[in-house]
Amino acid sequence: MWREIARFGKKLVEYGLVESHFGNISVRTGGGMLITRSGSALDEIDRDSVVEISIEGTSSMDLIASSEAIVHRAIYKNTSALAIIHAHCPYSVIESLIEDSRVVPVDSEGLYFLHEIPIVTGGIGTLELAENAASGLREHKGAIIRGHGTIATGMILEEAYVVTTQIEHSCMVKYHLDLLSGQDRGRGR
């Protein structure tokens, strides 16, 4: 399974959805999860870059797991997700700082697949973020953490990756459209 995590880690970095050492990926394994280690370069994941931790309780392995393990744990406990990708998509971060509580896509695919994208709050690796992310993802496949990045779920990693790319695409389109609309208003259009 670490090879599948590595494949999507490389794709995230290759397409600029995350910088190499930021973001994290996990896959549910019954009562546990495989999750990237803290500080792992997502484009260089190997067997030692992934650890298995429990979903129900903490252990000493939590010390080397991603700092967002608490968030992944809460999502697995409160949703039907089997895979999670957290990325630092630039346009999504920008839109989360512009919008209040949600981003409503203006592109047809975003409207069709996402409907709206909730914006959740909380500090990195905090219980507040874990609770808010799990709540936001009960009815949505993806959310944006204000000023921080996307968090997307799926039944498999590919689905979580597609949700990540769709959120970023919708945020990029909305950002450029809003920018253009602002320029047109300045020209009296």
Image (cartoon, rainbow, N blue to C red):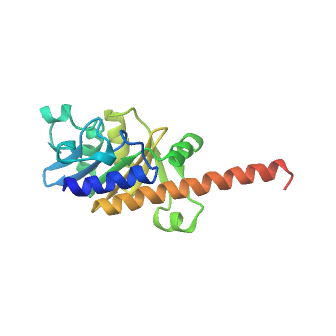
Q: Is residue 82 visible?
A: no
**Residue 67 % position (x, y):** 29, 35
> Would residue 73 be visible to someone looking at this image?
yes
Q: Is residue 176 left or right of residue 31?
A: right
Residue placed at 27% from the left, 52% from the top? 6
Q: Would you place residue 146 above or below residue 85 in this image?
A: above
Could you tell me which residue is drawn at 73 percent across and 54 percent down? 181
- The total of numbered circles placed on residues is 0
Q: In which quadrant is the N terminus drawn?
A: bottom left
Identity of the residue drawn at 26% across and 47% down: 45
Q: Is residue 75 left or right of residue 102?
A: left
The C terminus lies in which quarter of the figure?
A: bottom right
Q: From the top left corner, tell me how far across and down residue 119 is, in percent.
A: 47, 45
In percent of width and height, residue 143 lies at: 43, 50
Where does the image place residue 44, in percent across and percent down from the top left?
29, 46
Closer to us: 7 or 179: 7
Quarter assignment of residue 3: bottom left
The residue located at (67%, 52%) in the rendering is 178
